[in-house]
Image: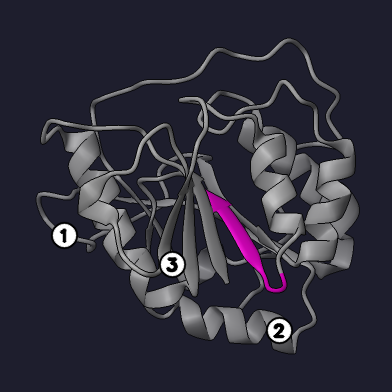
Amino acid sequence: MIAVSSLRNFTEKTDYARNQMAAHESWQEVFSAVVYFNSQKQPEMRNAKTRFLPAESFPPLLQLVELCAAQAEWCAILNADIIVRPHFRQVEERLVERRADCCASWRHQFDPKVGWEPCERVDNGLDFFAAEPPFWAKVYRDIPEELRLGAIQWDSWMAGYFNAFGKRNFFNITSTKTILHPLHGERSYGHAPPPVHFYGQPSMPSDDFR
């Protein structure tokens, strides 16, 4: 699976910078490649597995989805500070066995000063969506150009679309506790888009992925 995200440039050791670095390190273990849409390369993250593509600070999701649709394997679009635990590799294997088209996860929040545990779901945050390239091609056909990664409504729209068109092949993997979000105080969001059409309610299928 390929990880696709939008990296926020950093030159100082802020909490968000540290969270992005920690997330990047966790991705190296579970993803075959990592692609960041970013205005400049971060030297701390350069390696053979990581690629940077020029982009705005809050790139249109359309660009990320287009990349995912053109790949030969599963791709995940996720926020840059999301930790993905090592046992996600087994989760991916189970998704293939169950002939899934797509999946998503509510996030479990943790305190970086303490460690990954304890972690718990504390909100309805959805920062991780993964799918096979043919499903991303469907998303590309319908996604509004106004939606941007890191701006409000992107995850609500994506959850609604996955639920409406993934149907029985859309899996909720929250119970695996593989998708973690660090507690942080810094907030920096892109501009909210104008009203967009939602495909069904931004809900998740029952959490039966065990």
Q: Which percent across, then down, holds residue 120?
A: 36, 54
Q: Nearer the viewer, mark 2 or mark 3?
A: 2
Between 147 and 179, the one lying in front of the other is 147
Q: Which residue carries the number 1 mark?
A: 115
Residue 171 among those drawn in magenta: no
Q: Which percent across, then down, holds residue 119?
A: 30, 57
Question: Is residue 100 depicted above or below 183 in this figure?
Answer: below
Q: Is residue 85 visible?
A: no
Q: Which percent across, then down, holds residue 13?
A: 10, 36
Q: Which residue carries the number 2 mark?
A: 96
Residue positioned 73% across, 10% down in the render: 194
Label 1 is placed on what type of residue? Gly
What stretch of residues is rendered in magenta?
72-78
Residue positioned 60% across, 14% down in the render: 192
Between 120 and 53, the one lying in front of the other is 53
Looking at the rendered structure, the secondary structure element under dot 3 is loop
Q: Which mark is residue 72?
A: none
Q: Which residue carries the number 3 mark?
A: 177
Question: Is residue 62 depicted above or below 128 in this figure?
Answer: above
